[in-house]
């Protein structure tokens, strides 16, 4: 293998970050569009326009989530096991909410009854808004530390509850996640629609962007002044495979800001988040929707990277036993597994990116009421 074990661990931390950003940028606007559906569409034709902006591509975009989950399972099996056992109810909530998307898209237009279609509109809203909110709540709880620990046989024990996850800071992180994806979805609607729907989407993007910027700033202040972070005091060589309990971790005030002091270039992430929001909203008002969508994507990447850089190298901190916290160094699979995964990724990821780009090129253009009426039996 071309890379040593330590380098492979770091590469997979970066790859999983890329997958999460890819999911947020692609399937994120699907969720944002669905969350706006009952509010921006004032009649059935307008709602069908909104649905058909994402109807042809949402399934492909969702594969980013599946790929990210699979990559976490293969690259960080300990983190996957601890998270899926402890956060079982929250993850099931996301799964059940996502069920509404395929049935909502496929069944909404089967009947012309307004009550039937309105019910599916709200189902699609749930399928978009609930996962966006829960993903943010999950990140908020990671920054606080989750109540789990390992015993001396490496069995994981989760001592928290679902309701404890709904704490004030985690809910604020959920607002950041939901508002950023609703901003992203509204800007995508600006790009793909015209007329009244586009005008409403432009106003919606401004509201969501303002909420996102304010919530993100408040979360940063809260994290810096009111929440203890985690830092490693001692650990074995990062190039080795070792027991997570072999390291020493402490909680300390302001510890989540330590990486920004050590690596000042990391401050580019929160700067990109704020700048991306401002530039996206400005370009959207100027009528340059594609540029606005680009900057909205930059904002999403900046917010996700801010969380990742703050926690580095932690993957899943433990609030009950800091020494049980999982990091990219001790939660990883074997060197051979990471190496094989890297080879497969380097072969197939470029192919997927090329194919995805081609799909969006084919599906480009505005979705209008006229196009829906001309294709009433083939459009959603």
Image (cartoon, rainbow, N blue to C red):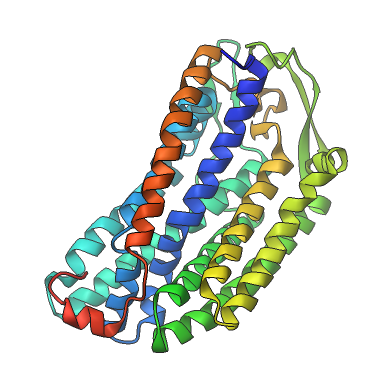
Image height of 319 relative to 164, above or below: above
Residue drawn at 66 percent across, 54 percent down = 302
Residue projecting furthest to the right: 261
* Residue in the foreground of this view, choosing between 149 and 306: 306
Image height of 367 relative to 29, above or below: below
Query: How many numbered marks, from 0 up?
Result: 0
Residue projecting furthest to the bottom: 196
Residue drawn at 43 percent across, 26 percent down = 344
- For the C terminus, give its image quadrant: bottom left
Residue 184 visible:
yes
- For the N terminus, give its image quadrant: top right
Using the rendered view, name the quadrant where residue 295 is placed. Answer: bottom right
Report whether 341 appears left or right of 142.
left
Residue 254 visible:
no
Using the rendered view, name the quadrant where residue 69 is placed. Answer: top left
* Residue in the foreground of this view, choosing between 309 and 275: 275
Q: Where residue 235 appears, x then y in whole percent?
A: 76, 17
Image height of 319 relative to 174, above or below: above
Q: Where residue 189 appears, x then y in whole percent?
A: 43, 74
Residue drawn at 36 percent across, 76 percent down = 366
Image height of 8 relative to 33, above or below: above
Residue drawn at 55 percent across, 77 percent down = 288
* Residue in the foreground of this view, choosing between 292 and 142: 292
Q: Where residue 129 appears, x then y in whole percent?
A: 44, 63
Q: Where residue 6 appears, x then y in whole percent?
A: 67, 18
């Amino acid at each position: 293998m071309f890379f040593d074990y330590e380098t492979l661990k770091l590469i997979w931390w970066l790859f999983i970050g890329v997958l999460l950003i890819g999911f947020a940028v692609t399937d994120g606007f699907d969720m944002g569009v669905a969350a706006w559906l009952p509010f921006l569409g004032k009649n059935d034709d307008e709602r069908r326009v909104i649905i058909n902006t994402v109807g042809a591509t949402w399934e492909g975009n969702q594969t980013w989530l599946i790929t990210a989950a699979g990559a976490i399972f293969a690259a960080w099996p300990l983190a996957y096991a601890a998270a899926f056992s402890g956060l079982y109810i929250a993850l099931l909530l996301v799964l059940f909410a996502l069920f509404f998307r395929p049935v909502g898209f496929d069944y909404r237009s089967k009947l012309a009854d307004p009550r039937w279609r309105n019910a599916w509109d709200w189902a699609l809203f749930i399928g978009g808004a609930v996962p966006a909110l829960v993903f943010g709540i999950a990140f908020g709880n990671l920054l606080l530390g989750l109540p789990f620990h390992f015993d001396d046989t490496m069995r994981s024990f989760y001592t928290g509850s679902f309701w404890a996850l709904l704490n004030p800071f985690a809910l604020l992180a959920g607002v950041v996640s939901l508002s950023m994806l609703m901003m992203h979805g509204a800007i995508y609607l600006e790009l793909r629609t015209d007329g009244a729907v586009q005008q409403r989407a432009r106003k919606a993007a401004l509201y969501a962007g303002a909420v996102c910027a304010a919530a993100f700033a408040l979360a940063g202040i809260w994290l810096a002044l009111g929440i203890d972070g985690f830092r490693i005091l001692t650990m074995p060589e990062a190039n080795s495979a070792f027991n997570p309990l072999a390291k020493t971790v402490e909680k300390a005030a302001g510890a989540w800001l330590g990486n920004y002091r050590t690596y000042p270039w990391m401050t580019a992430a929160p700067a990109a988040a704020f700048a991306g929001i401002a530039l996206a909203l400005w370009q959207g008002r100027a009528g340059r929707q594609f540029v606005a969508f680009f900057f909205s994507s930059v904002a999403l990447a900046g917010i996700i990277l801010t969380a990742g850089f703050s926690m580095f190298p932690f993957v899943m901190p433990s609030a009950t036993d800091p020494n049980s916290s999982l990091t990219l160094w001790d939660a990883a699979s074997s060197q051979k597994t990471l190496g094989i995964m890297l080879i497969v990724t380097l072969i197939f990821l470029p192919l997927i990116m090329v194919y995805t780009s081609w799909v969006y090129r084919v599906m480009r253009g505005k979705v209008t009421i006229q196009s829906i009426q001309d294709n009433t039996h083939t459009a959603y």
